[in-house]
Amino acid sequence: MKGRQRSSDSSLRVRFSGSEHGKAHARWYRIIAEHYDRLYDPRRVTRASAFLRYLFHRHAIGRDVLDVACGTFAIDLPLVKRGYQVVGRDRSEAMIRVARRNLQTAGVTADVDRAEMQSLHLGRRFDALLCLGTAFNYLASSADVHKALRNFRDHIRPKGLLVLDLTNFDAWIQHPNNVRAEVDYRSVDGTKIAIFAFNEQDVRKGIHHARFLTVVQRRHRTDIGFDEAPLRIWKKEELARALRAAGFRPLEWWGDLRLGAKYERSQSPRIVSVSSSR
Ligand SMILES: C[S@@+](CC[C@H](N)C(=O)[O-])C[C@H]1O[C@@H](n2cnc3c(N)ncnc32)[C@H](O)[C@@H]1O
């Protein structure tokens, strides 16, 4: 599938396509963006937002927040409603479109636009910078990681907070969970979405190969898309070293974006690191 676009019209009603090498990300979010907020457990957003407010309060930081992979802005909206000025950036045009619509529906305003973490340049600093929901794992090469961390540092005020939320692939390696029917969803307009994941970890290279078969049925038409993307596997100690080298001081580790979720290497679904900018 890698390296070229495949599409077949072997049937009038079923279309199969594979992402071009390197374009899996954009294609997948284009298909899924409209439905993204309803595909996963809505409690995640409420818990994450409460968790972030707790952190901001405890570390006595101000109200200027930058979310560098804001997606649909779902986690940021409750913060905006509570008086935080959240700026959102994301590389996916489709996700930014939904973020703008979510803002409009909520009757609030925020600066959201397209940008990539590796080339971010807003020319100002924030009290906290968020990178949530596996986005940091998408930076598979060390060069991209360095660029992103340098940009994060340049956008945070001294003593400001960096909150990273990564998938804890350490736990996956110990408890393989690589073949899953991840989503089975029907939207109000009758669109049916099923997502099957079949992943693999290359432990030696520290890469998780995320592979998805996404099936979307709209009335009598079915689109089947195959996408794969390399995600970087981070261990806590390795992440702590990278953060220190980039000018951050790791302060806390959590096992999920919710209050009380202790980090446990072989169990936690997430690695959430909270660091301060030196
Ligand atoms: C799984 S979604 C999470 C969205 C949101 N942060 C959340 O937690 O609900 C990952 C998001 O990261 C964005 N993303 C991935 N790589 C990125 C990059 N290099 N720069 C900016 N955004 C990126 C994707 O477009 C997508 O919207």
Image: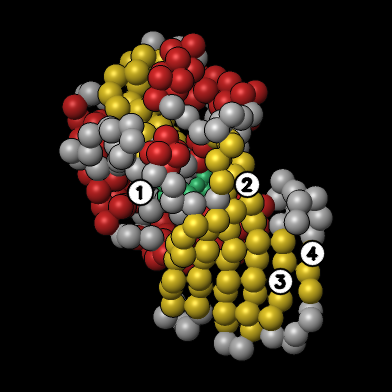
Residue 199: x and y in percent read: 55, 50
Q: Measuring 31% from the left and 60% from the top, which residue is drawn there?
A: 42
> Do the residues bearing badges 4 and 3 touch, measured as CB atoms within 8 Å?
yes
Q: Is the C-beta of the residue carrying label 4 under 8 Å from the nearest atom of ligand 1?
A: no
Q: Which mark is residue 16?
A: 3
Is residue 114 left or right of 46 when viewed as pictured? right
Q: Earlier in the sequence, mark 4 or mark 2?
A: 4
Q: Whole-Å distance between the Cαs marked 4 and 3? A: 8 Å
Earlier along the polypeptide chain: callout 4 or callout 1? 4
Q: Secondary structure at mark 2?
A: strand
The kind of residue on which mark 3 rests is Phe
* Nearest-to-viewer mark from 4 and 1: 4
Can you tell which mark lies on residue 229?
2
Q: Amino acid type of disc 4?
A: Arg
Question: What number is the disc on residue 128?
Answer: none
| Circle 1: residue type | Ile
Q: Are marks 2 and 1 in contact (CB under 8 Å)?
A: no
Residue 203, picture quadrant = top right
Q: Which mark is residue 6?
A: 4
How crowded pointer 4 is (Cα within 10 Å; few <14, some 14-19, many 20+) is rated as some
Q: Quarter of the image for the N terminus: give it.
A: bottom right
- Which of discs 3 and 1 lies nearer the camera? The answer is 3
Q: Residue sitting at 79 percent across and 74 percent down? A: 8
Please give the count of numbered marks on the rendered protein: 4
